[in-house]
Image (tube, grey):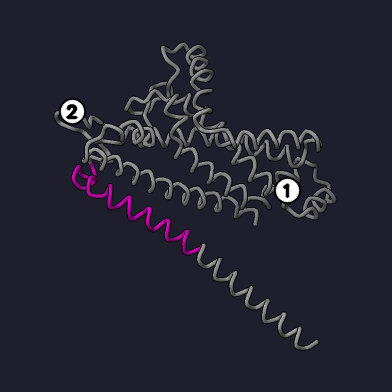
Amino acid sequence: MADSLIRARRTKNRMERVFEWIFLICACAAILSVVVITAYMLISGGPAVFKVGIGDFLFGTEWAPTASDPKFGILPMILASLCATFGAILIGVPIGIFTSIFLSKMAPKRAAKFLKSAVELLAGIPSVVYGLIGMIIVVPAVAAIFNLPTGACLFSAIIVLAIMILPTVISISETSIRAVPGYLEEASLGLGATKIQTIFKVVIPAARSGIITSIVLGVGRAIGETMAVIMVAGNVVNLPELFGSVRLMTTGIVMEMSYADEFHKSVLFAIGLVLFVFIMVINISVNTVLKKASKKYE
């Protein structure tokens, strides 16, 4: 009996060590992937930035890579990307959070099950389909409502991106809200708070970590989207106006990579490097701001 227990314990310890090594290898692979991508972007795009000039590249307003006197200023694309992302978050995040509250706390079980399936289906739709729907429905609607010659503009891109980030925000926020311990809600209701007060004063603060994660992932998807935006934004390198045609950084890379010469390709990689840095900075900033804002609930 004692021998069998010892053997079982040794087998268990071996399995523990095997899984520890598996987890370590997976973690190292993830870190290595980030390092390799960062190094590749720096090697491919870094020289072009210094050749053009950091100031001219980041703050130049002219983009004419095929002209006799090439210009490589990407400030309009940077500002358009930031405006589109900010607009999508401004519209999509409140809708997503309120929908997650409805699904987790207010909707009847059958309705919640049906709506959750619809959200999951929305998450599985390819980006190009969002772009087609935006081109067929959103762009003509924007042109008609605001009496514009064309509806392919920054506002259309914001609407499409706001719809695209909804599944991410809704799914993660709902999971976080459902994970809040029931005794917190019961205690609040027992003290005389209404259901709405309990949701906004107790449940949402308790689920803030997951909600913050959903917002950060939504930011990442909005700023990195290409195929949908390329169909609805107009794709003209202009300083951003709400109802003006714009080109985002991602679409600029995709549209010109096929015919770019060697240096032009290097500049496009440099745009990717800027986009990579922006995504990191925005994610860190959003995390920092939201965590500071949530400290009052601690």
Label 2 sits on residue: 67
Q: Residue at x 52, y 13 (%)?
A: 145
| The one of 128 and 151 positioned closer to us in this rendering | 128
Quarter-of-image position of residue 169? top right
Residue at the location (26% across, 49% down)? 46
Is residue 91 in sight in this rendering?
Answer: no
In the drawing, what numbered circle is on residue 147? none
Residue holding disc 1:
178
Please state the horizontal and vertical placement of residue 44, each as a whole percent of the image: 28, 49
| Image quadrant in which the N terminus is located | bottom right
SS for dot 2: loop
Above or below residue 26? Residue 156 is above
Look at the picture and state if 157 lies above or below 198.
above
Mark 1 Cα shell of 10 Å, populated few (<14), some (14-19), many (≥20): some
Between tags 1 and 2, which lies in front?
Answer: 2
Q: In the rendered structure, does residue 264 fall within the stretch colored magenta? A: no
User: How many tags in the picture?
Assistant: 2
**On the rendered structure, is 186 left or right of 213?**
right
Residue visible at 74% across and 33% down in the picture: 114
Q: Is residue 88 left or right of residue 101?
A: left
Sequence-wise, which precedes: disc 1 or disc 2?
2
Label 2: few (<14), some (14–19) or many (≥20) C-alpha neighbours in 10 Å: few
Q: Amino acid at mark 1?
A: Arg
Q: What secondary structure is the magenta-colored segment mainly? A: helix
Identify the secondary structure beneath mark 1.
helix
Which residue is outermost to the left?
68
Q: What residue do we see at 20% from left, 44% from top?
A: 53
Span of residues in magenta: 27-55
Mark 1 vs 2: CB contact within 8 A: no
Q: Give how far across and how far down residue 110 sits, in percent.
A: 80, 35
Where residue 194 sits in the image (x, y, percent)? Answer: 80, 42
